[in-house]
Image (cartoon, rainbow, N blue to C red):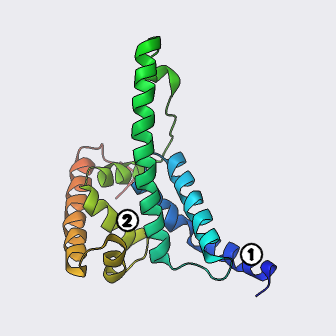
Amino acid sequence: MNQHKFNQNWQNWFTKEASKFLLFAKQQSRNSYEAEDILQDSLVKLLKKSSHKEIPEDTIVYKTIRNLAIDYARSNIRRIRREEIAQELEGISMAEWFENDFDKKDRQKRLEDAIKILPEKQQEVIILKIWGEQTFDGIAEILNLSANTVASRYRYGLQALHKSLNTKHKHKTPNPFKS
């Protein structure tokens, strides 16, 4: 396969699959910006590894994203420690350095918040199953677990998510325009 045809195949594949990979990267990271970096680094790593021969399987992409997210988290912990030491030396508050400015739609925000309060093990499984379009067997391979464990985490996660969203929804002011 010539280089141009491979680039076109890779681009078509990425355009089709990017949203589910990005969603998984967001679940694995602290914010959207970090998730985008993790996804990009994962794809670059996989592209180099493939020697421009084939498109990687989804399970390999998810594993690479997960491993890089772990590396990013470790790196961030070290960076935060260094910044805290520097802050103590200089007396500058972290709030002055960074400001979060995320505007999200209400429904998306509620869902994200509800997912974030789930145990991490349930979060991973739900993201991979629903948005990652993975089977229980595929998720089991990605997470190095049994398919039964994955199915249980999925079931318990959905129950907790349902309960959390319904509880939060009851406290909202009803919409007078909905019947």
Whole-percent x and y of residue 24? 44, 62
The residue at 34%/78% (across/down) is: 141
Whole-percent x and y of residue 153? 22, 68
Q: In this orientation, does residue 114 appear?
A: yes
Determine whether the residue tagged by mark 1 lies in a helix, strand or loop: helix
Q: CA distance from mark 2 to mark 1?
A: 28 Å
Whole-percent x and y of residue 10? 67, 75
Residue farthest toward the bottom in the current orientation of the protein = 1
Whole-percent x and y of residue 53? 67, 82
Give the amino acid at mark 2.
Ile
Give the amino acid at mark 1.
Asn
Rendered-image quadrant of the N terminus: bottom right
Q: Nearer the viewer, mark 2 or mark 1?
A: 1
Work out whether 124 lies above or below 89. Answer: below
Determine whether the residue tagged by mark 2 lies in a helix, strand or loop: helix
Q: Earlier in the sequence, mark 2 or mark 1?
A: 1
- The residue under label 1 is 7
The residue at 47%/74% (across/down) is: 60
Question: Which residue occupies the foreground of this view, 36 or 146?
Answer: 146
Asked if residue 119 lies left or right of residue 90, the reply is left
Asked if residue 47 lies left or right of residue 59, the reply is right
- How crowded pointer 1 is (Cα within 10 Å; few <14, some 14-19, many 20+) is rated as few
- The residue under label 2 is 127
- How crowded pointer 2 is (Cα within 10 Å; few <14, some 14-19, many 20+) is rated as many
Question: Which residue occupies the foreground of this view, 99 or 34?
Answer: 34
